[in-house]
Image (cartoon, rainbow, N blue to C red):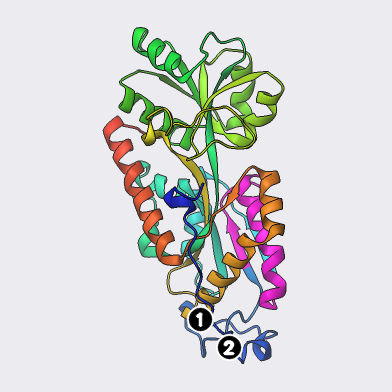
Amino acid sequence: MTDHPLFASTPVRRRALLSGAAALAGATAVWPQGVFASDAWPLKAVRIIVPFAPGGGADSSARVLAELFAPQLGQGVIVENKPGAGSAIGVTAAAQSKDGHTLLMGSNSMVINPSLVPGIGYDVARDFDAVGMVSAQPLVLVVPASSPLKSFADVVATAKAKPGELMAGNSGNGTLAHLTSEIFAGQTGAALTPVPYKGESALMPDLLGGLVSLGFLNLPSVLAHIRAGRLRALAVSSPKEVPELPGVPTFRSLNQPSLEVQGWAALFAPKDSIPAAGLARLEKLLAEALASDAVKSRFSTLGVSPVIQSRAEAVSFIKAEGERYATVIKARGIKVG
């Protein structure tokens, strides 16, 4: 997957850790508004806010990193879940945290929500420093095993011949699954009817039962059903075929690069809350962790791939993602609720 911008691997510059860090490891001083007496960091336990409920990909990734970061930082690393409002509650809480020891495990939703909810209360570029990308996972276009749709071309042809008849189940208005179905409609001119559910778990029984026609869903949530023959995979959104689904074409190979949509996770810090040396240290530790066999193995069980990028590359990618989804939301007239 190295030819896609999201998977571009960049050498991380090696920086020497400050000599005073060890001496300050046990300190508990909190400096207001992220102003530190020196560049030594951290001075106390670090908190990673996950704006989702426990058990999902972002939460699991955060816990993997927390285990690896703690001994390297010489402080505890705590994962705190703050779900709600499509991740906006946790993201807003992180943006407002200026104790200098708070991080955020963000995802696509944090750059999608500002275009869906005017006055949401945070701005990604204004309120956050990106530490780096963490992981990515593809979406899979799936249909029930009983469906007459055997290929991506079948979906396009049927949707054009019978506009609105094919129902595209998704995990809620404005979610990645929903936006992908809207991108599909905009690019192919084939009309789908989006059907929102309260999460993929609520959608799955109706998809398996054929009450909805198809879905663009996360690989981990559909893989077991595909292997059991309950769902049929027609295409994946990764740049290259995924090992778990041999023979399933990519959207790129089907000349649909606009559908190369992937779920991603990235690590952030509230803007100007952590000193430059602390951010550099986190960037280094993150890259080393993601390159390790331990993380590759753990992430594999989660159905995600590590993504190593420099902070500058992460900032550029995240900005482009926000612009991409803002364009889709405006063009397709997508509203929440």
In the image, is residue 305 above or below residue 213?
below
Dot 2, crowdedness within 10 Å: few (<14), some or many (≥20)? some
Tell whether 136 sits left or right of 244.
left
Which three-letter amino acid code belongs to the residue tagged 2? Leu
- Separation (CA) of disc 1 from disc 2: 8 Å
Q: Residue 66, how many percent across, how many down? A: 67, 63
Q: Residue 73, how many percent across, how many down? A: 66, 76
Which residue carries the number 2 mark? 18
Q: Can residue 133 be seen in this view?
A: yes
Tell whether 272 sits left or right of 61.
left
Q: Residue 18, how many percent across, how many down? A: 58, 88
* Magenta-colored stretch includes residue 72: yes
Could you tell me which residue is drawn at 34 percent across and 12 percent down? 160
Query: Is label 2 in a helix, a strand or a loop?
Result: loop
Could you tell me which residue is drawn at 48 percent across and 74 percent down? 273
Q: Is residue 164 visible?
A: no
Q: Determine contact: label 1, label 2, CB under 8 Å.
A: yes
Q: Residue 329, how many percent across, how many down? A: 33, 37
Decide which of 28, 288 is in the foreground and name it. 288
Range shown magenta:
47-76
Which residue carries the number 1 mark? 277
Q: Tag count in the figure?
A: 2
Could you tell me which residue is drawn at 51 percent across and 90 percent down? 37
Which three-letter amino acid code belongs to the residue tagged 1? Ala
Q: Residue at the far left: name it.
A: 331
Q: Quadrant of the image for the C terminus?
A: top left
* Magenta-colored stretch includes residue 32: no
